[in-house]
Amino acid sequence: MERIGVIGGGLMGSGIAEVTARAGIDTVVVEVSQEAAQVAEDKIRSSLERALSRGKIDEAELAAVLGRITVATDLEALADRDLVVEAASEREDVKLDLFRRVGAILEKDDAILTSNTSSIPIVKLGAVAGRADRVMGVHFFNPAPVMQLVELIPSLTTSPETLARMQAFVTDKLGKQPIEATDRAGFVVNSLLVPYLLSAIRMYEAGYASAADIDKGMVLGCGHPMGPLALSDLIGLDTIRAIGISMYEEFKEPLYSPPPLLDRMVDAGLMGKKSGHGFYAY
Ligand SMILES: NC(=O)c1ccc[n+]([C@@H]2O[C@H](COP(=O)([O-])OP(=O)(O)OC[C@H]3O[C@@H](n4cnc5c(N)ncnc54)[C@H](O)[C@@H]3O)[C@@H](O)[C@H]2O)c1
């Protein structure tokens, strides 16, 4: 795994690219436009500058990491990659289209194509990629450079060899801690987390308490590092809504269904921290 491609340079893609480049790997990030590619590059640079200011890396390391990252707008830039991590927006149509195209572009027979999706069935992505045995889910957590956990999700068609290669890569090369989950919407962490976040949004919507008090309740009452509404803003309200919809479609469990307030906020462009406004202003 010497050449890695990351599709999408948003919240997660930029963090994943930073992780792989910091692990010494040549990394290409593909975005939808030159402008988006520039935003992704700026995000990675400012994250590295934060690491520098905290003494986690030095100037030479910062320059070396940036030197390993190339941004592009054409999926053809992924042709020679050993591994691709797709981290585009949480939309099934977008991901199916990407897997169809990238599956045909990858030149190496043993190249692995993975998705950072939180809830879209991996088996569907494998089915369109033309290499179903070499497709699986690799779910990083936000912020990727800081969070240790990576969920590994083999689908019904993923080969044991692909899973073993990704286990070794995540552990030995990235220094992260994998857990394995089955290909069910939400995997392990979001299956537990998303209904909790949606319940907090419902509680706020129903006027139980202010956003600040709901968050303070969980921070001080349960020792969580962050309350559920602040965490929703950090994850991105569009992403939480999309995960809730996928989980609801799969299990028909009412707790997974996004509340109307979340729909309205997303329709209004209030996506949380990444758009500057969600339950809080940033
Ligand atoms: N936000 C989180 O906390 C979190 C955590 C784990 C996993 N995820 C998953 O990671 C993925 C990305 O989420 P995010 O939070 O980074 O979203 P985001 O909105 O911050 O970024 C998505 C990026 O994908 C780009 N994109 C869209 N279509 C594309 C295409 N066809 N080709 C290339 N780039 C494209 C967009 O321009 C955008 O920059 C989703 O599948 C999400 O479920 C998110």
Image (tube, grey):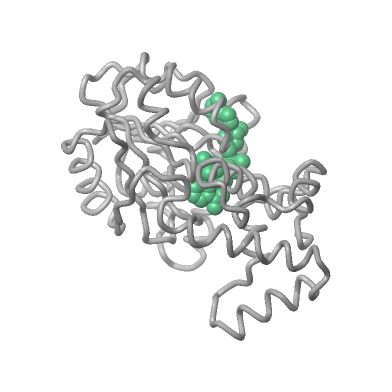
**Residue 42 visible in this rendered orientation of the protein:** no
Residue occupying image coordinates x 21% and y 36%: 162
Residue occupying image coordinates x 36% and y 52%: 151
Q: Answer above or below: position of 63 versus 102.
A: below
Residue occupying image coordinates x 77% and y 54%: 277
How far across and down, in percent of the image, does residue 31 sit? Answer: 55, 29
Which one is in front, 7 or 256?
A: 256
Q: Answer above or below: position of 84 versus 13.
A: above
Give the quadrant of the N terminus.
top left
Which one is in front, 251 or 7?
A: 251
> Horizontal placement of 187 versus 136: left or right?
right
> Horizontal placement of 47 versus 105: left or right?
right
The quadrant holding residue 132 is: top left
How far across and down, in percent of the image, does residue 4 sit? Answer: 34, 34
How far across and down, in percent of the image, does residue 130 sit? Answer: 32, 17
User: Could you tell me how many numbered marks the image carries?
Assistant: 0
Residue occupying image coordinates x 61% and y 43%: 245
> Horizontal placement of 77 versus 227: left or right?
left
The quadrant holding residue 217 is: bottom right
How far across and down, in percent of the image, does residue 13 sit? Answer: 49, 41
Q: Answer above or below: position of 157 versus 140.
A: above
> Horizontal placement of 227 versus 267: left or right?
left
Q: Quadrant of ligand 1?
A: top right
Q: Answer above or below: position of 227 versus 278.
A: below
**Residue 167 visible in this rendered orientation of the protein:** yes
